[in-house]
Amino acid sequence: MKRQMDDKLIQKQTQSSAETLRNTRIQKLNDLVDKGINPYPYTFDRTASAEELQEKYKDLKPGEETEDYYNVAGRIMAMRNSGMFMDLMDSSGKIQIFSHKENLSEEKITNLKYLDTGDIIGASGTIRRTPRGELSLKIKDYKILSKSLLPLPEKWHGLTDIEARYRHRYLDLIMNEDTRDTFRKRSLIIQEIRNYLIEHGFLEVETPMLQTIAGGAAARPFITYHNALDMQMYMRIAPELHLKRLMVGGLNEKIFEINRNFRNEGLSPKHNPEFTMLELYQAYVDYNEMMVLTENLISTVAQKVLGTMVIEYQGKNIDLTPPWDRATMTGAIKKYTHIDFSQLLSQPEAIDAAKNLGVEVDENDSWGQILDKIFEEKVEPQLIQPIHIIDYPRDISPLSKAHRDNSRLVERFETRVNGWEIANAFSELNDPIDQRRRFEQQVESKKDGDEETPSEVDYDYITALEYGMPPAGGLGVGIDRLIMLLTDSVSIRDVIAFPTMRPKA
């Protein structure tokens, strides 16, 4: 009880201190206005970034000066000697600002007292390197561009309340170069994915986020309502069925979409309700071509962005160099459990085997669902190096073509890296009669209480298939998980700028 009271007292004192600092800064802002200075002007003519200057003058020796004149702009991250020295940070890096009465007017020297860490300023002057080796701009003028009313945190990088960094991402970006680097790499990774596909003949398309039927995946949807149409709608859980409609229409033989999906499910280090996927389709190929495409796409992106195909994730070296290993689902289970499920073909046999392995299953689970649960618990954690797990049970793959050699299976693979599912791909089902039968089976499962299956059949999609869709391979890649791997990030929240979180009271 005393500890709780102490914590509340500390919190109250902290809030009071922050409010005092804010009031002091507001007074400075008012003083600037009274002096006729606009603390939020419209523009500033910046002529160089910190990175450009650091690169251009990297060979300037300590104590040397130039007459080269530049305008820089950025946020004040530190101030020393009453503003004589300031660390100015822009999006490219940092440069020191040197303010001295020999170079600044008396008014500008006086007005230094109105500056605080966090303020954004523009500064103009010449380049020098201090005797201690710090590249500096010896300024002859400066201009406040945005007065910061709240102080920057003093100890942000090691903050124990990690959620504060997610809730206030703007502060995380200001204070942490690692965070800025992660999100720059995120942008580059997505850019290189797009470049690779376009260079290989794929056409980028867009499909609806609002849908009348939540289809294309097994997931609980977010439900919304369209007032003008007076109807319930769903946020997209997958773009698959609309992308395949475009394949039917012959828009292009290779199409892709980098899309936002929404699934009303739990949170975890690998799951966020709103996430980014790559989904693509290519006519006249099967899942074997999709395996090659997956390997080449991901390894090329790693090489382009990181300069290597051998990455380190949480102390583990992972080699993305193609080709990657392949194993059937039953073969992988046999390797790690010594049970051959290709010989245990009945559902009761599969349940008994799962129980003997200590895997919890439901009596109503199908043979394929039981295999999936065993694989997830006993096999997934072992798969650190890239591997394609191929030939999944038919009863958990309603959109995949039946395996040409075993009708109990389908031609589907999931790519695993570091134990995670990174990609999911099929030889796409284009038989409308078979597809209708599987959809209707899903709806029956819904009646039995499966909340992740669609509640109705998408008959328009069946109609589209009846006009004929070419044989095709399809691939989905989890962009957020891929970025986690390539940036050595431990949580999906580290690679999504604004992850879904419960609001604070």
Image (cartoon, rainbow, N blue to C red):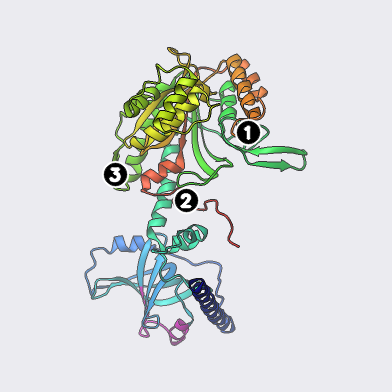
Q: Quadrant of residue 313?
A: top left
Q: Residues within 10 Å of mark 3 (few under 14, many from 20)?
A: few
- Would residue 449 be found to the left or right of residue 473 on screen? right
Q: Is residue 453 in sight in this rendering?
A: yes
Check disc 2 and report its element: helix, strand or loop: helix
- Which residue is found at the position 46% from the left and 83% from the top? 113
Q: For the view shown, which residue lies furthest in the top direction? A: 405
Q: Nearer the viewer, residue 345 or 482?
A: 345
Q: Mark 1 is on which residue type?
A: Ala
Residue 70 in the image: state x and y as whole percent: 38, 68
Q: Amino acid at mark 3?
A: Lys
Residue 322 image position (x, y, % from top left): 30, 30
Residue 261 higher or lower than 242, as above or below: below
Residue 128 is marked as none
Residue at position x 35%, y 44% in the image:
305
Tag 3 and tag 2, C-beta contact below 8 Å = no
Which residue has dot 3 on it?
Answer: 316
Magenta residues, start to end: 97-113
Residue at image mark 2: 493
Quadrant of the rendered image containing residue 229: top right
The kind of residue tagged 2 is: Arg
Mark 2: give few (<14), some (14-19) or many (20+) Cα within 10 Å.
many
| Quadrant of the frame with the C terminus | bottom right
Q: Which residue is mark 1?
A: 214
Q: Is residue 446 magenta?
A: no
The image shows residue 480, relative to residue 197, as above or below, that is below
* Residue 67 in the image, given as x and y percentages of width and height: 31, 72
- Between marks 2 and 1, how big is the CA–CA gap? 25 Å
Whole-percent x, y for residue 91 in the image: 42, 60
- The residues tagged by marks 3 and 2 sit, at their Cα atoms, a distance apart of 21 Å
Q: Earlier in the sequence, mark 3 or mark 2?
A: 3
